[in-house]
Image (cartoon, grey):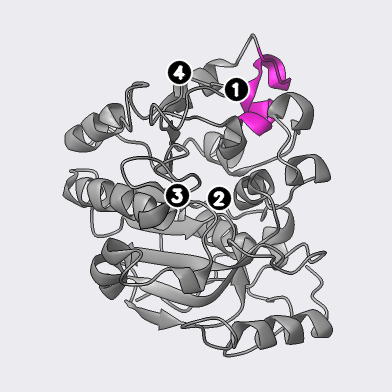
Amino acid sequence: MTVRVGTLAVIAASLLLLPGAQAPAALAGPARATPADGVPTFGNVFMIIGENTTYGQVTKNTAPYLVNDFKPGAAWFTTYFALTHNSTANYVGLTSGQYTRCEQVDNPPSKCHQHIDNLFTLLDRAGSTWTEWMESATGPCDVVDSGSDALLNEYRVKHNPAVYYGNVQGQGGHFSATEPSRECLKNVIPAGSTAPNDTSALDAALASGSVARFNLIIPNMCEDGHDACQPRGPHQGKIRQFDEFLQREVPKIQASPAFTSSSVILIVYDECDCEGLHGDPFYGGGQVVLAIQSGLANPGTYSGLLNHYSTLRMLQDGLGVSGTYLANAATAAPIDMIWK
């Protein structure tokens, strides 16, 4: 990753204008850390992605569970950035270390599929397991939008990164809207039914401890904070909707037999509700929250310039698939400062 000094100066200046933000401790160039970065071996990982929320918008009033309950036991990052606008590019960047212009404008996988290595294929090769839990999807490997905000079950494929990889989604490694691979049918599954805000399948798996090593949990368009849905609506805020999803689901993760002292819960937002830095491919999505809770990590507030590629690098390290870092994860600043 090549980061211009001018870009870093703009980021530093912009941070000082955001409520509750701190300037980065060091605006360094690409990290030169050796593979593994001192990241310990993770147990089961649970990554939950929220939508379109700027760092300064997350407060004890707008997101009381995240700030008052989750943050005190978490590593909380004050200078963490999304890659770009819009959503799909950030989801794909988080799982493959790169994105294309087609994904940046939120085109569907029928137009944007790539045949490249990604976190899912690396886990497959390592003999590890993974699941994408897609709330309100109509079935496994769902590549078609469905539902509505009015019914509290709006599913949008643009938030489903696995189906953008032909070597995950399609048979023989080729994307197919009508003939998905067995891998996709097995691993990219609904979190519940299409009933309002239903996560019954995920909840049952958590209760029994029958979950994968890596779990990517994607709420529907109401519960991820993207849209303003009833009963809260616009006056009580989209941010609260995602916070209430976390308040409901995170304790179920923590109470699961699958959750041990080496497990990791990672909460991150895809992009800010702001302009970001147009034209910057690494920090252009604006400042967002990243919070990591684990028995392996020291709770506290951390600075230092990081982005979604840093998170991917950390996941590769912790999940034991960092022999070759994926695309821009290879030169991303490592998340190596929080571990015990």
Sequence-wise, the earlier of marks 4 and 3 is 4
Residue 35, image x, y percentages: 60, 65
Label 3 sits on residue: 225
Label 4 sits on residue: 138
Sequence-wise, the earlier of marks 4 and 1 is 4
Q: Which mark is residue 321?
A: 2
Q: Quadrant of residue 30?
A: bottom right
Task: Say above or below: 186 vs 161.
Answer: above
Amino acid type at circle 4 is Thr
Give the number of the mark in front: 2 or 1.
1
Q: Nearer the viewer, residue 62 or 199?
A: 62
Q: CA distance from mark 2 to mark 3?
A: 31 Å
Sequence-wise, the earlier of marks 2 and 1 is 1
Q: Nearer the viewer, residue 119 or 111?
A: 111
Residue 267 lies left or right of residue 174; in this view the side is: left
Q: Residue at x 42, y 27 (%)?
A: 136
Q: CA distance from mark 4 to mark 2?
A: 31 Å
Sequence-wise, the earlier of marks 3 and 1 is 1
Amino acid type at circle 2 is Val
Write the start and end of the magenta stretch as one range. Answer: 163-177
Q: Quadrant of residue 116?
A: top right
